[in-house]
Amino acid sequence: MRILVIGGAGYIGSHVVRAFLDSGHEVTVFDNLRTGLRENLFPEAAFVHGDIMHPLQLRAAMAPGFDGLVHLAALKAAGQSMLHPEEYAESNLTGTINILNEASRAGIRRFIFSSSAAVYGSPAYLPIDEEHPKDPENFYGFTKLEIERLLDWFDRLKGMRYAAIRYFNAAGYDTLGRIGGLELQPENLLPIVMEAACGQRPKLSVYGDDYPTRDGSCIRDYVHVTDLAEAHVRAFDYVGREDRSLTVNLGSERGVTVLEMIERARALTGRPIEAEIAGRRAGDPAELVASSRKARELLGWVPRFSDVDTLISSTWNMYERVCSK
């Protein structure tokens, strides 16, 4: 089938494109290359350079006709969203409305959306399932939740079936080394650990060591980006087969502390990776762990690469290329 992947040159997007190609689909990437990279484009996939803020560019890209659309184009730094909400409103909300309007005009009836665990806010209970209260603590999470609500209306009014996929902490890289470029300006733990291992930064900060966890640092649920990408393909198939929309969490269901991740990275990379303890960051809960039972039951999705060693080693394989230059 013909799939349009918006934001397909980015970190997660390139893995999603790879998964659809590996499943035999015909893929077109639409990306403005603001954070996406040409190195992440595959020769088997068509590429359209365009911006979601320009509806006519979207309209032209969708004109050939597509069986489905994957939307991964968004600003995603939670902290920055609190400083610059106007930018996040424009890119995430207005941009998505442009995509929805043009997809509806083009007759696209399957819409796969990159959502986030940020829609939940601080956990009222663990593990977090899809019925957990939705109370975002940052503007980024708010935009993701509002888009989910928009999708629900387009389902009811336009018959556009969607899958909203709520990621926990995406990490890792393609284990076969088929992704060409590193994520630009990463803000997540594992890439920052790798930058310290490479010497791109002298040390990294651990924000708090006095949480009520087994070693005092925060616990997070990390899911390998290849596992995430596979779930997008399975969600696309489900939406078409069942003719119904879907919202699922994607996480490994295993919590790893910040200090555990750093210590294991030291062992696997053979690098010292200097870390300093800093104060807690506002809004950082002690523990976030997903329930992915719904994805298992409805999609048959089981993460294959989300163990700590694979997360670290696949990321280090990418960063070691930089270190060796």
Image (cartoon, rainbow, N blue to C red):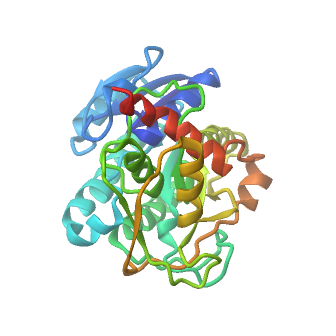
Would you say residue 228 is visible in this rendering? Answer: no
Left or right of 221: which side holds 115? left
Residue pictured at 48% horizontal, 62% vertical: 148
Question: Can I make out residue 61 in this image?
Answer: yes
Residue drawn at x 63%, y 20% as measured from the top left: 24
Measuring from the top left, give residue 146's x and y in whole percent: 41, 67
Image position, residue 32 (x, y; %): 26, 35
- Horizontal side of 319 relative to 93 (left or right) equals right
Q: Nearer the viewer, residue 258 or 73?
A: 258
| Quadrant of image for the N terminus | top right
Q: Nearer the viewer, residue 48 or 22?
A: 22
Q: Nearer the viewer, residue 233 or 19?
A: 19
The quadrant of the rendering that contains the C terminus is: top left
289 above or below 18?
below
Q: Is residue 16 left or right of residue 86?
A: right
Q: Is residue 146 above or below residue 306?
A: below
The tally of labels here is 0
Q: Position of residue 61 (x, y in %)?
A: 33, 28
Residue 47 coordinates in the image, percent (x, y): 35, 22
For image coordinates 47% across by 28% down, the residue present is 179
Which quadrant of the structure image shows residue 234?
A: top right
Q: With respect to residue 116, does 38 lie above or below? A: above
